[in-house]
Image (tube, rainbow, N blue to C red):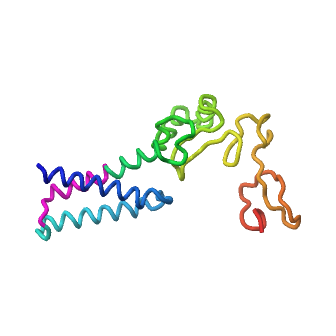
């Protein structure tokens, strides 16, 4: 009994530690397949070692430790996203803080995400936190990464967003209508 509790605590502690030391920093969404392969390989190696009696651990304890590790990892991620993330003070639906499935499920009703986002802006105001993809998504009604909700009030005007793009040869920056395909130094600065 005491051994099972110790194994569980070890698994949870390793999961929380993995989140705080590694996964809490940077973007990991692109690396998900590699992370899955790594965890699967470690789990398979631990099980094989257990079955071959290379280590004095029962296979059930290996599985219990792995399950507790994953539970601790995801539990730590949820607590971090809900209460300690740098965008946690911004308004928005609570479930949207935890996962992108919230906004995905909400948009699946009529397949009109823009209408759902407008409703959220009407409820929460100009700033709405919508999720975690690809980095924490903070939706603004008029600002850098946003579509204006009220063109009359927006800095962008009725035609859409304006960027401050580099104007080659002018030596200065100025408002220019957004060019989605414009990349590189000639368009964005020296």
Q: Total label count?
A: 0
Relative depth, front residue between 29 and 19: 19
Residue drawn where x is 82% and y is 52% of the image: 175
Residue 161 rendering spot, x and y as whole percentages: 75, 46
- In-image side of 148 versus 70 (left or right): right
Residue drawn where x is 80% and y is 40% of the image: 157
Residue 172 rendering spot, x and y as whole percentages: 85, 62
Quarter residue 19 falls in: bottom left
Quarter occupied by the C terminus: bottom right
Establish if 112 lies above or below 179.
Answer: above
Quarter residue 129 falls in: top right
Provide the major secondary structure of the magenta segment: helix
Q: Is residue 68 magenta?
A: yes
Residue drawn where x is 40% and y is 56% of the image: 20
Quarter residue 118 falls in: top right
Q: Is residue 107 magenta?
A: no
In the rendered image, the residue lying farthest to the right is 170
Residue 52 rendering spot, x and y as whole percentages: 12, 69
Residue 77 rendering spot, x and y as whole percentages: 41, 49
**Residues rendered magenta in the picture:** 56-71
- In-image side of 149 versus 86 (left or right): right
- In-image side of 45 versus 97 (left or right): left
Relative depth, front residue between 46 and 72: 72
């Amino acid at each position: 009994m005491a051994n099972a509790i110790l194994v569980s605590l070890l698994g949870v502690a390793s999961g929380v530690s993995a989140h705080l030391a590694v996964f809490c920093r940077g973007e990991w969404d692109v690396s998900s397949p590699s992370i899955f392969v790594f965890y699967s390989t470690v789990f398979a190696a631990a099980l094989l070692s257990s079955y071959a009696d290379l280590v004095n651990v029962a296979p059930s304890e290996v599985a219990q430790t792995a399950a507790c590790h994953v539970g601790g990892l995801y539990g730590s991620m949820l607590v971090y996203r809900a209460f300690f993330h740098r965008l946690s003070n911004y308004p928005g639906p609570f479930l949207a803080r935890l996962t992108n499935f919230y906004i995905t499920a909400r948009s699946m009703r009529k397949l009109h995400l823009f209408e759902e986002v407008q409703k959220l802006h009407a409820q929460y105001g100009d700033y709405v936190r919508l999720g975690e993809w690809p980095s924490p998504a903070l939706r603004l009604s008029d600002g850098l990464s946003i579509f204006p909700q009220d063109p009359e009030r927006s800095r962008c005007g009725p035609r859409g967003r304006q960027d401050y793009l580099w104007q080659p040869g002018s030596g200065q920056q100025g408002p220019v209508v957004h060019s989605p395909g414009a990349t590189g130094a000639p368009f964005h600065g020296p």
